[in-house]
Image (cartoon, helix red, strand yellow):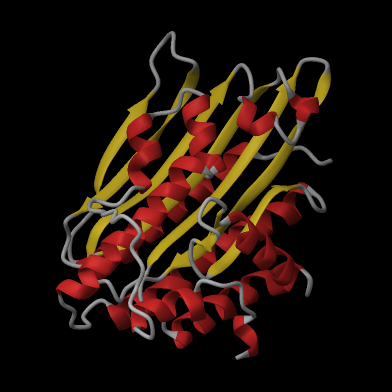
């Protein structure tokens, strides 16, 4: 396995954060605030990052685009559960993670993450891997949005083999699934983890292609939906469905668990949660309604490119 180039990964991730924040700010008309942070002496993790948040904007009700580069003396349980041979190793973790929650219920929430890990030991070669992807969580479904999202995902994967998009799509459908509710979180996209295929340069190129595809995938959808008229009914349904998003992130998401178990920065980890959310006991959309159609026609794994 070729040696990792951590400085090149860091430079790419910082630039990606800048590009995404600039593009979202241009749509919203309001800039992200930045909180640069550094871990102090005696903490479990060393390193730091840049947390950028846009709250109560013109288009974005809550959005965050985070960069972090941290290191620790021992991988947490969430990272070694499926890689027990790495238990006890020190590590470095770099990544950009983002969640955008638009104000308009017709504009979907989007999530993206690209990351790089290195597990190190004095008596062994470093073990590195990439991970990432992007997924879309609509509250009101539009087939053209879903098809565009998946076409862009397929195009990002195409240079790396015809099997990559179908594999990463299935991985995304399987991962963003609320087991306790038997529901998909959204309409999927791409997800991959522990990726070491080929040499470092090849694997890094794949991660960059996925990261670079986020804006072409999301901006046309956000632009189409951000000014659609809506009322209290749509807003209420949006807040209820956001509850599902919160449930997934706090119960099932490996990134959230890794951050909390490793002693990560809580404010940055929980940046992904929406500003407003609602739970209603035994809520079911009215049969035959457009809200019910979200569950029956969109929140089921589907081959969107076949439409």
What residue appears at the point 32 percent right and 83 percent down from the top-left corner?
Answer: 224
Image quadrant where residue 190 sits: bottom right
Residue 123 visible in the shown view: yes
Residue farthest to the top, as pictured: 42
x then y, percent, for residue 240: 30, 60
What residue appears at the point 56 percent right and 57 percent down from the top-left corner?
Answer: 177
What residue appears at the point 64 percent right and 75 percent down from the top-left corner?
Answer: 154
Marks counted in the figure total: 0
Image quadrant where residue 56 sits: bottom left
Quadrant in the picture for the N terminus: top right
x then y, percent, for residue 209: 61, 64
What residue appears at the point 81 percent right and 41 percent down from the top-left corner?
Answer: 2
x then y, percent, for residue 100: 35, 59
User: With 207 as the anchor, is 244 left or right in this view?
Assistant: left
Is 145 located above or below residue 300 in the figure?
Answer: below
Residue 14 visible in the shown view: no
Image quadrant where residue 289 sits: bottom left
Is 2 located above or below residue 174 in the figure?
Answer: above
Front residue of 251 and 219: 251
Front residue of 6 and 99: 99
x then y, percent, for residue 268: 36, 37
User: With 266 as the anchor, is 251 left or right in this view?
Assistant: right
Quadrant in the picture for the C terminus: bottom right
């Amino acid at each position: 396995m070729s040696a990792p180039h951590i400085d090149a990964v860091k430079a790419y991730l910082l630039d990606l954060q800048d590009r995404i924040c600039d593009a979202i700010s241009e749509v919203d008309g309001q800039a992200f605030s930045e909180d640069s942070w550094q871990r102090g002496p005696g903490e479990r993790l060393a390193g730091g990052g840049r947390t950028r948040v846009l709250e109560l904007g013109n288009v974005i009700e809550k959005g965050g685009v985070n960069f972090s580069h941290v290191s620790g003396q021992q991988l947490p349980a969430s990272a070694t559960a499926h890689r027990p041979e790495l238990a006890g190793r020190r590590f470095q973790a770099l990544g950009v993670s983002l969640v955008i929650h638009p104000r308009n219920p017709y504009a979907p929430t989007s999530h993206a993450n690209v990351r790089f890990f290195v597990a190190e030991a004095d008596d062994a070669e470093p073990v590195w891997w990439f991970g990432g992807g992007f997924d879309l969580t609509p509250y009101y479904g539009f087939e053209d949005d879903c098809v565009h999202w998946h076409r862009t995902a397929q195009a990002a994967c195409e240079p790396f083999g015809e099997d990559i998009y179908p594999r990463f799509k299935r991985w995304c459908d399987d991962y963003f699934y609320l087991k306790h509710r038997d529901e998909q979180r959204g309409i999927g996209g791409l997800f991959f983890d522990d990726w070491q295929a080929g040499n470092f340069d090849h694997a890094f190129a794949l991660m960059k292609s996925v990261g670079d595809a986020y804006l072409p995938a999301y901006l046309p959808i956000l632009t189409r939906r951000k000014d659609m008229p809506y009322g209290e009914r749509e807003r209420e349904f949006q807040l209820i469905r956001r509850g599902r998003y919160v449930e997934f992130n706090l119960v099932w998401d490996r990134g959230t668990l890794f951050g909390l178990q490793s002693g990560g920065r809580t404010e940055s980890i929980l940046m992904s949660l929406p500003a407003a959310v609602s739970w209603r006991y035994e809520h079911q959309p009215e049969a035959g309604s457009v809200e019910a159609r979200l569950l029956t026609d969109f929140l089921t794994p589907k081959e969107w490119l076949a439409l």
